Image (spheres, rainbow, N blue to C red):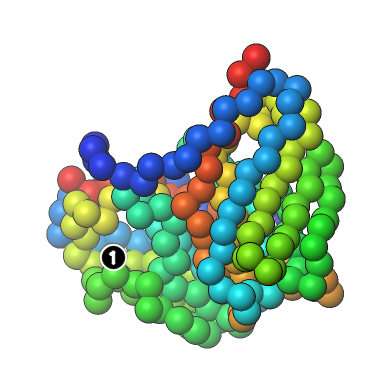
């Protein structure tokens, strides 16, 4: 296998704690942003999206915050569970719904 | 809807052989994307289509790679000839935007191993 690869930052949390995963994006003209969850051996799974004219959106146990001034996006997961362990990607979208992905953050939930 | 369907799920082939990956997008989605995921580079956008028309193929690594979308319900990604460095997981995604919501869903991927 490959010995050198992307070094994914890892966030380790205790079960039941809240998790905050951060993402910096590059294109100030992006129309929307999406958070994805990817479990081992599976495709990225849509979690939540936010339009560029919003600064907060809430879903079930998740909240996404958008700060366009500093081009920063965050995903907050409430009461983190072992099933939340995965790699999380932010993606920025624009024309034709083209999505460009960040490198990802690994979330490890410990009992 | 069954979601984005990719086939095969796994493909092992010998260097030099032609490989064809297939994708069926979600019905009603008007954009389709092919991505490649590796440990070295993460998720890379290879090519995308809008209403069956290729919009941007600047992510396709070489002329050995080609993609088609003959109709709204089917797309292929072909590698000819394949090389060991093409080994990766290839994902297809389809998207649509309605009002303020964007749907963008991925298939389960095809794990390609070229030996």
Crowding at dot 1, Cα within 10 Å, few <14 / some 14-19 / many 20+, comes out as many
Front residue of this view, candidates B42 and B78 = B42
**Residue B46 visible to an observer of this rendering:** yes
Q: Quadrant of residue B106?
A: bottom right
- Residue drawn where x is 66% and y is 21% of the image: A14
Q: Residue at x 45, y 81 (%)?
A: B56
Residue A27 in the figure: left or right of residue B15: right
Q: Residue shown at 75%/55% (left/top)?
A: A65
Give the x, y percent position of residue B91.
48, 56
Q: Can you say whether A48 is above or below A19 in the image? A: below
Q: Nearer the viewer, residue B31 or A57?
A: A57
**Badge 1: chain ID:** B
Residue under the image location 81 percent in, 67 percent down: A54
Quadrant, the N terminus of chain A: top left
Q: Secondary structure at mark 1?
A: strand
| Residue A26: x %, y % from top left | 53, 69
Of A50 and B49, the residue lying toward us:
A50
B39 left or right of A105 in image: left
Reply above or below: A20 against A94: above
Relative to A3, A92 lies left or right:
right
Pick the front one: A38 or A16: A16
Vertical arrangement, residue A39 with respect to residue B15, above or below: above
Q: Position of residue B9 (x, y in %)?
A: 44, 45
* In the image, farthest residue toward the front: A69
Image location (x, y in percent) of residue B111: 38, 46
The residue carrying mark 1 is: B79
Q: Which residue is outermost to the top?
A: A111
Spot the residue most to the left.
B16
Q: Is residue B7 above or below residue A62?
A: below
- The quarter in which the C terminus of chain A is drawn is top right
Would residue B29 be seen by someone viewing this image from the given angle? no
């Amino acid at each position: 296998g490959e010995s050198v690869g992307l070094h994914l930052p890892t966030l380790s949390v205790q079960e039941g704690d809240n998790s905050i995963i951060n993402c910096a994006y590059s294109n100030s003209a992006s129309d929307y942003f999406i958070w994805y969850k990817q479990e081992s051996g599976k495709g990225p799974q849509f979690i939540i999206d936010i339009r560029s004219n919003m600064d907060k959106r809430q879903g079930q146990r998740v909240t996404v915050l958008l700060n366009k001034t500093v081009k920063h996006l965050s995903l907050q997961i409430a009461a983190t569970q072992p099933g939340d362990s995965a790699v999380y990607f932010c993606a920025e979208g624009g024309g034709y719904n083209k999505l460009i992905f960040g490198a990802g953050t690994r979330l490890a939930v410990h009992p | 809807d069954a979601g984005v369907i990719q086939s095969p799920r796994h493909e092992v082939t010998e260097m030099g052989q032609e490989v064809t990956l297939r994708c069926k997008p979600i019905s009603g989605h008007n954009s389709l994307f092919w991505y490649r995921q590796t440990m070295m580079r993460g998720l890379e956008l290879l090519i995308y289509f809008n209403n069956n028309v290729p919009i941007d193929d600047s992510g396709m690594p070489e002329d050995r790679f080609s993609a088609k979308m003959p109709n709204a319900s089917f797309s292929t990604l072909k590698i000819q000839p394949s090389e060991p460095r093409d080994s990766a997981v290839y994902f297809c995604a389809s998207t649509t935007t309605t009002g303020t919501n964007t749907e963008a869903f991925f298939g389960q991927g095809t794990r390609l191993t070229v030996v």
